[in-house]
Image (cartoon, rainbow, N blue to C red):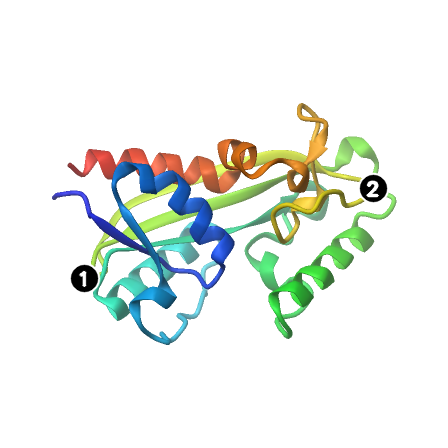
């Protein structure tokens, strides 16, 4: 099976498209967003209860809808003190209504409230990203997983990134995920790890 020359990233989030494009683009791949290939497309029901399952659901569904090779990811935040929450519900943890910015604000407020009084040694957390690549007929070609380890900070810091980035504190860097310059974040983020593993998987496809 030969490697694809063009990949559609199954997301409406432009930040994700740019991050993935920055990693897969140098392979000579054309990386497009869903908006660039038509639509609107019906969103599949993300019924999986882990990141891997939801990434697979999205990749297969959008590949069949678009007739193209599709890369989908499912990602979110896992907080040990919260039993792994918000997990697969990260994007809608505090409700699905409103704009992305409004949802992010509610989610971050909920995180701050749930972590109030939790001691520093119990604040371990990580971003997780699982990716799935499916061909135009919906056959799974490759799956990868990446993590970005840190802990929940005492206060949100930084303006880069999106979502929960201001809350993930990185002890070794002495800053939050949202304080990392984009190139440094790409080099160590969960999505970066998963995308680089996907790049290697695509190379192996020939």
Number of numbered discs on residues: 2
Q: Quadrant of residue 174?
A: top right
Q: Examine the rendered structure and indicate whether residue 34 appears above or below residue 184.
A: below
Tell me: 92 left or right of 2. right
Q: Nearer the viewer, residue 36 or 58?
A: 36
Q: Quadrant of residue 53?
A: bottom left
Front label number (1 vs 2): 1
Read off the residue under disc 1.
Answer: 137
Tell me: 60 left or right of 49. left
Q: Is residue 74 visible?
A: no
Q: Examine the rendered structure and indicate whether residue 155 appears above or below residue 135.
A: above
The disc at residue 118 is 2
Task: Identify the residue at image location x=65%, y=62%.
Answer: 93
Which x, y percent locates residue 191? 48, 42
Which x, y percent locates residue 167? 72, 44
Describe the element under mark 2 as helix, strand or loop: loop
Task: Identify the residue at image location x=61%, y=65%.
Answer: 100
| Category of crowding for the residue at label 1, using alpha-carbon neighbours closer than 10 angstroms: few (below 14), some (14–19), many (at least 20) | some
């Amino acid at each position: 099976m030969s490697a694809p020359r063009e990949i559609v990233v199954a997301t409406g989030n432009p930040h994700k498209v740019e991050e993935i494009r920055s990693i897969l683009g140098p392979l000579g791949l054309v990386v497009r967003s869903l908006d660039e290939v038509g639509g609107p497309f019906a969103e599949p029901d993300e019924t999986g209860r882990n990141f891997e399952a939801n990434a697979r659901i999205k990749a297969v569904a959008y590949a069949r809808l678009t007739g193209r090779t599709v890369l989908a990811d499912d990602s979110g935040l896992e907080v040990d003190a919260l039993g792994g929450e918000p997990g697969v519900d990260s994007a809608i943890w505090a409700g699905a209504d409103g704009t992305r910015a409004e949802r992010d604000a509610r989610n971050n407020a909920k995180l701050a409230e749930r972590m109030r009084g939790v001691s520093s040694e119990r604040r371990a957390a990580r971003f997780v990203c699982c990716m799935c690549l499916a061909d135009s007929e919906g056959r799974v070609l490759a799956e990868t997983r990446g993590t970005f380890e840190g802990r929940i900070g005492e206060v949100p810091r930084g303006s880069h990134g999106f979502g929960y980035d201001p809350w993930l504190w990185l002890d070794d860097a002495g800053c939050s995920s949202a304080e990392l310059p984009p190139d440094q974040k790409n080099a160590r983020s969960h999505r970066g790890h998963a995308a680089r593993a996907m790049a290697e998987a695509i190379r192996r496809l020939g």
